[in-house]
Amino acid sequence: MKRSMKTLFVLVLALALSCAACTPSATVITKETITQLAGSPVLQSSEALTGKWTLDGKAFWLKGVRTADLYDSQTFQAVASYDVGEYGALYDTSPDGKLIAYALDEPSIVLYDVIAEQEVARIPQDAFVQLAAFSPDGKTLGIASSDTWSIDLWDITAGQVSQTLTGFETAAPVYSFQFGADGKTILWMARGTIQPMDMASAALGPEMNHEDFISSFALSPDGDLLATSAAGSVDGDFKPLVTIWDAHSGEALAVFSNDDYFSSLAFSPDGKLLAAGNNVKILFWDASTYQPAGEIITAAGYVASLQFSPDGTRLLTCTTEGSVQMWQVQ
């Protein structure tokens, strides 16, 4: 019965998305079209925690703790799927829609091609890998070790480390990193501190500090703006906040407060919109005027992941309840 219901969900969703694909041209999501956004039927997934588009927008990944599923973005049919197993740790999925990076119970990273169904590389490590992520162009894998405050940039084509980044220092023992959407910046993060670094020069930018732990962050496509979510004080109240920073100077340009926790952030591909997910809701702001631009109601749960398609016409969302939806202008 469960299998039949899931099949029905996929068929209904595929029909809805294929009908949308029949329109002459899709409409870009802007502040003027937010009120026209319509969500697809919900695809329920027990594993999906994050969604990620491929570079061409023809497919997207749904990534869980151990599973990676690749879907056709028009039909919502699964193209490939891989489970790293009970003792595996899934790190990331590649923008080209082929590779996943994961680890087993040994200090090494496996690169596996889910389309060709074969291992393409095994990257030896001296210690357990805390985090690994693909660059926006998919040519580099960033690898953060658990015993050093450094990130190795692994050239996937050459099969070797092309650069090692260091210099981020904080009293917090736990840290993470993320490639900026501009493809030129690494964002270092530890608890309430975040700091950009130019990858070419390895020069650190300004340090931006928060009163509480940073729950999510995103860099604008041009690398000029950094959005972060963390609780902070506003008029004597401690509330969930979204802050927009000048990524070059570290100046806080705007602060938005809310009564509910912000669980995800994303800029539109043209950098004109900032979207923030919280409990069953996505809020939008104009990224140039910092004014509210609208909101939409999503499926049950906090919006754990949201990402605009490369052409800006669709928004993919995943909630903490495993509900996956595609949003388009109707």
Image (cartoon, grey):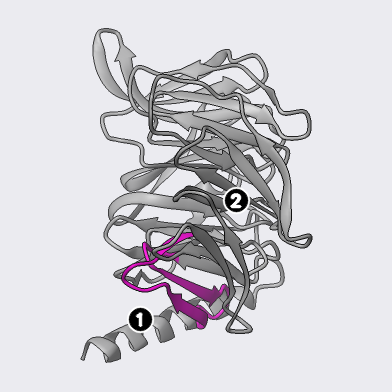
Question: Which kind of residue does numbered mark 2 sit on?
Answer: Ile
- Part of the protein shown in magenta: 63-91
What is the three-letter code of the residue carrying label 1?
Phe
Where's residue 56, x and y in %?
Answer: 70, 65
Label 2 crowd bin: few (<14), some (14–19), many (20+), radius 10 Å: many
- Residue 171 visible here: yes
Q: Position of residue 314 (x, y in %)?
A: 57, 59
Question: Where residue 236 is drawn, which disc sits there?
Answer: none
Question: 153 and 54: which one is in front?
Answer: 153
Left or right: 101 with respect to 85? right
Q: How many marks?
A: 2
Residue at image coords 28%, 22%: 239
Name the residue: 54% across, 81% down. Answer: 75
Residue 328 visible, this angle? no
Instruction: Look at mark 2 in the image and give the residue it sits on.
Output: 29
Task: Describe the element under mark 2 as helix, strand or loop.
Answer: loop
Q: Which residue is found at the position 33% from the left and 71% from the top?
A: 45
